[in-house]
Image: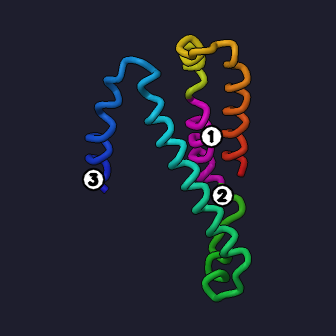
Amino acid sequence: KNFYIFLAVIVLSPVCWIKHLKNLSWIAFLALAGMFLALSVILYYDFYYITSDSEEQKDVTSSVKIFDIAHYPLFFGIAILNFEGNPATLNVQASMKYPKRFPFVFIVSAFTVSSMVIT
């Protein structure tokens, strides 16, 4: 665990020194690609276990809790994290090549992130 934390610090520290949002686009793309990959893997295993009649599926479904109040802080923390970039929208709009397209881009991106979180 400590190795992965150290690796993340080494990889992400130079990102903190980037001065222009335009230079962050490739990092945002990698983060979005990772989010889509993670969602795809989660959905694949969900559908696999739902459609499977194996003993393994019965073990998984017997250990799933539908409601667990202890995990709600984690749920709300993840939900807030997904939308934490909203204060940066003015900076993004100002740095766009065509700022008049910002409302469309914002609506599409907010809808996409919301759909992924709901899924």
Q: Which residues are magenta?
A: 69-84
The residue depicted at 73 percent of the width and 28 percent of the height is 107
Relative to 51, is 90 above or below? above
The residue tagged with tag 3: helix, strand or loop?
A: helix
In terms of image quadrants, where is residue 90? top right
In the rendered image, the residue lying farthest to the bottom is 55
Answer whether residue 3 is magenta in the image: no
Q: For marks 1 and 2, give the CA distance.
A: 17 Å
The residue beneath circle 1 is: 79
Q: Earlier in the sequence, mark 1 or mark 2?
A: 2
Q: Position of residue 11 (x, y in %)?
A: 30, 41
Answer whether residue 83 is magenta in the image: yes
Q: Position of residue 65 (x, y in %)?
A: 67, 66
Question: Counting other residues with Cα less than 10 Å from the Cα at mark 2, is it few (<14), some (14-19), or many (20 or more)?
Answer: few
The residue depicted at 71 percent of the width and 52 percent of the height is 119
Q: For marks 3 and 2, give the CA distance.
A: 29 Å
What is the count of numbered marks? 3
The residue depicted at 31 percent of the width and 23 percent of the height is 17
Q: Earlier in the sequence, mark 3 or mark 2?
A: 3
Identity of the amino acid at label 1? Ala
The residue tagged with tag 2: helix, strand or loop?
A: loop
User: In the picture provided, is 109 more to the left or to the right than 13?
Assistant: right
Q: Which mark is residue 2?
A: 3
Q: For marks 1 and 3, give the CA distance.
A: 26 Å
Question: Counting other residues with Cα less than 10 Å from the Cα at mark 1, is it few (<14), some (14-19), or many (20 or more)?
Answer: some
The residue beneath circle 2 is: 68
Relative to 104, is 100 above or below? above
The residue depicted at 57 percent of the width and 16 percent of the height is 96
In the rendered image, the residue lying farthest to the front is 97
User: In the picture provided, is 20 more to the left or to the right than 78?
Assistant: left
Relative to 71, is 78 above or below? above
Question: Counting other residues with Cα less than 10 Å from the Cα at mark 3, is it few (<14), some (14-19), or many (20 or more)?
Answer: few
